[in-house]
Structures are given as C-alpha cells and as structure tokens.
Amino acid sequence: MLYPIFWLITLGTCIPLSSFNVQETTNYILNAINDPQKEIQIENILKNPLVYKDYPPIVSLPKKDQRTLKDGEIPDYVLKYSPLVHLYSEERYLPYDIQKFVTNFHVTYKNGTIIPGTEEDMTLEKLSKLPKHSEIFLTSNSDFDKNPEWITGFKNKPNLINGEIKDAPAVLITVDKGNGWVDSYWFYFYSFNLGPFVMGQGPYGNHVGDWEHSLVRFYKGEPIIVWMSAHGGGGAFYYKNLEKYSLDEKHPIIFSARGTHANYPSVGQYPHDLPYGILSDFTDRGPLWNPSKNYLGYTYDGKHVFPTTNHSNPKQAGREWQYGNWLSYTGHWGDQQLPDDDPRQVYSFIGGYKYIDGPMGPLMKNLLRLKPCERAKWWNFWSGCNVRQNIKWGVGIESEGYNCGNLFINVRPTWLKSGLQRVTWGGGFCYIIDLIYG
Ligand SMILES: *[C@@H]1O[C@H](CO)[C@@H](O)[C@H](O)[C@H]1NC(C)=O
Ligand SMILES: *[C@@H]1O[C@H](CO)[C@@H](O)[C@H](O)[C@H]1NC(C)=O
C-alpha cells in the first residue's frame, strides 16, 4: 500500500480467557464514516433495502440473535470461496511470515527513541505488549535497502501444485455483520513495497512492511461482493463476474501487482492516482498463491479477536495461540520515512519520497466497514464505492492474450521469443502450468 492511514483507537485493558482484547468500539460500522450528517444519510438509505440491497442491513453491532456465527467459528464457505492470488511473474518481493519478520527490528517512537525491551530479540509477543500508540515504528536492525532475505522473501514462492506458501501464512479475519451478512478478510503480508516508477524515474513510495487485503462479503453463505485493496483505495466487484480458478471454479482470482502488491481483477497495466497513465501498476499470470492452504484464522467482533476454534487444516490448528495477541499492535509495520539527509532518501516533485512510512496492521483497515470499500479516496468521499458489474481489463501490452514473461515480448522471430519465455522462470512456470492443467 502506498498511502497508509493513521487511526487512533481506544483500547480495552482486560483480556478474556478465550480471546485477545484489541479494541473498544462503541458505534459499530458507522464509526468508520466519522461524520454525523453522512451517518444519517446512510441510515436513511439503509431503511430502503431496494436501493441499498448489497450492504449489510444493520447500523449497530449485531445482537446475539442477529448473528449466524459463534466467536472463533469460521464457516466452511469462507474457505470454499477464498480468493487465489496471481503474484507477478518477476516479483522480487514475496510474501513473508510476520513471526520471522519482526525478529529483524527494534521499536522506536517518532522521535527515534528506542522503546525499552525491544533493542534485541524482538518477538510478536513483545510487539503485543507495546504501548498502544499509533506513532511507533518497527525499525530495521540492518539495512533493508540491501535486499536481505527477510525483505525479499525470495524462497516464498507458491507450491506449483497446490499454491501453498509453506513459510508465509496469510491472515484470515472473519467478521459477522449480522442478519446473515459475513465479511471475510484475507490479509497478505509482504516485507517490502517497491513503489512505482514515474516517467522513468523512481521508484517512489517504497516502504518496509506491506499489508494488502481482500474482502469476500457473504450473504447467507453465498459470496456476493469481492473487494480488493490498491493504494489505500481499491475495487469492489460482484463475485459472479470475477474470473475463477479453473480447477475449482468457486475461488475468485485476484492479481497482485509488481512491487506494490496492489490487487486487481485482471491482467495488464493499471494507471492510478496520476493522469495519463504515468503512474501504473502491472499484473500478470505469475505464480498462483492459494492463501487458504496456510493461514492464521480469527474472528473479530469489534472488540475482541478470537483465534479460530475450527481451522480447516488440523496441522495448523492452535498456531494462532503461538502467534499471540499480535493484532493488538497499533504501530507501523516498518521503518519511519527516511529523513531527507539519509543518503537512501530521494525526493522529487513528481513522485514524492522514495521511502515512506511502513503501514498500519490489519485491525486498522476498517474491518467494521459498511460499504465493501475500506474507505473512499478524499475526492470521492461519499459515492466512492461502486460495486462493479463489469471487470475492467488492464490496458497495455500485457493485457489479455498475454500469458507469461513480458521480458521477451519484442523478440522476433516468434519461435525464439517463445523459446526464451519457456526457459525463464516466469515463462517456465506458465509452461508447466499449461502442461499440468491444460
Ligand atoms: C466450523 O464449524 C462449523 C460448526 O460446526 C461448521 O459449520 C464449519 O463448516 C466449520 N468450518 C470449517 C472451516 O471447517
Ligand atoms: C520521544 O518520545 C517519547 C514518547 O512520546 C518520549 O517518552 C521520549 O521521552 C521522547 N524522547 C526524547 C529524546 O525526546
């Protein structure tokens, strides 16, 4: 994510036996809007279900009799319809395990003071006991700019057969929104975000730690809407219109963009944030990641996080307890924006800074949202969350018809190009997939 948001939250203090206490919220979903006028507007619209039929028809925390799930219960449909993610074929920054990730850091305040006890041997447990402060930063012990293994995660490629990434669990958080509506959030953690290039310069907006996510919204066990994150905004689509996994057509497919890991529903070039396509993301059919093969599962009721009581993979059951109450960490998951006098830092008026703040964690991503979008961009505050019927295709040479390895796209003759694509990792991957899956 390029532009992390900063949310101050109030925190509870008691820790019930069966859950991790993370956050006190009084006013449920509408909290996210933070504007009384808009809240009244939404409430009125909600009273007219014909107009707003796709949103959960509730305005407060669901009461016991409105809930369909118990705390810690993840229904099987959440796994059945979980998204699969095509990583970019030449992706250099792969998913990573948060437990291993944090061992490379200490924690600092904004003024650079190290929080005592974090100087060495950082663990998720230490992270969960830090002051509940949004302006604290996981700060690298060594130079992340040298692309060490804990930054690139280069070993964490999906298994070619089942899509599992063995050493990098995804994070699943299910939220019961009442009256049959259930939101399932899949979080994807990458150690590094490589920002985009602008007119041949850059990259801009790099940061350590990268939390991306998607949401599958269910109504009575049926998937209705899929939303996917991209640069602090994102796209919402009707489930039925998304591409599905060819071997099991229940799973929607998401494409993770090169470097930024922004998520899109198709292959190609995606201009964003700046006009004329000068700032673009690129997606392709690189390795296919199946996050449901390796995940940490939780439910969230707005106040507590409950580790799943029925993990779909018995071998992973109980692992959430080993990871502990890490979701209660309220700070940044990576270094603070490098100071202007740091030799690694660059500023340009076109692209901004080369290195910016690391992002906030999963519970800071508006999981109690009413609309499927995390938030609208400032210029589109109210109507910014259209759920799309049509999947917009990416533009550019990599769009449709493209298969793998754009590296040799201009090589002629064609037989030489396809030969080169096949011997490269990206091209080779596609070839194998073609052989196996036809
Ligand atoms: C969890 O348990 C519930 C209730 O027994 C069941 O309906 C659901 O399918 C289970 N989920 C998984 C992922 O096995
Ligand atoms: C830095 O900020 C923290 C938290 O606000 C404070 O406790 C500490 O004293 C500050 N350190 C310095 C050197 O100002």
Image (cartoon, helix red, strand yellow):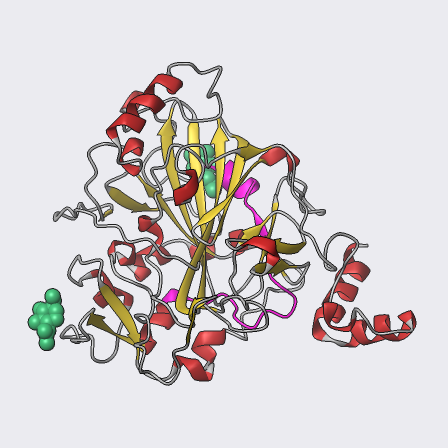
* Image coordinates for residue 22, horizontal then vertical, percent: 22, 48
Q: Position of residue 6 (x, y in %)?
A: 28, 53
* Residue found at the very far front of the displayed protein: 349
**Number of numbered discs on residues:** 0
Q: As displayed, is residue 160 above or below residue 423?
A: above
| Spot occupied by residue 48 in the image (x, y as percentages of width and height) | 42, 14
Query: Predominant secondary structure in magenta?
Result: loop
Q: Is residue 344 visible?
A: yes
Q: Eyeballing the image, is 362 above or below 100? A: above
Q: Is residue 94 magenta?
A: yes
Residue 242, quarter of picture? top right
From the viewer's side, name the closer residue of 48 and 82: 48
Ligand 1 visible in quadrant: top left
* Quadrant of image for the C terminus: bottom right
Q: Which residue is painted at 56% across and 40% down in the image? A: 81
Q: Is residue 365 above or below residue 415?
A: above
Front-lying residue, 434 or 190: 190
Pick the quarter of the image with the N terminus. bottom left
In the rendered image, the vertical position of residue 92 relative to residue 78, given as above or below: below
Which residue occupies 54% across, 33% down? 387
Residue 191 lies in quadrant:
bottom left
In this picture, which residue range is highlighted in magenta? 75-98
Tell me, yes or no, whether the highlighted magenta stretch contains residue 78.
yes
Name the residue at 36% across, 57% down.
4
- Is residue 76 visible in the rendered structure shown here? no
**Left or right, residue 48 beside residue 390:** left
Give x and y (percent) for residue 211: 42, 58
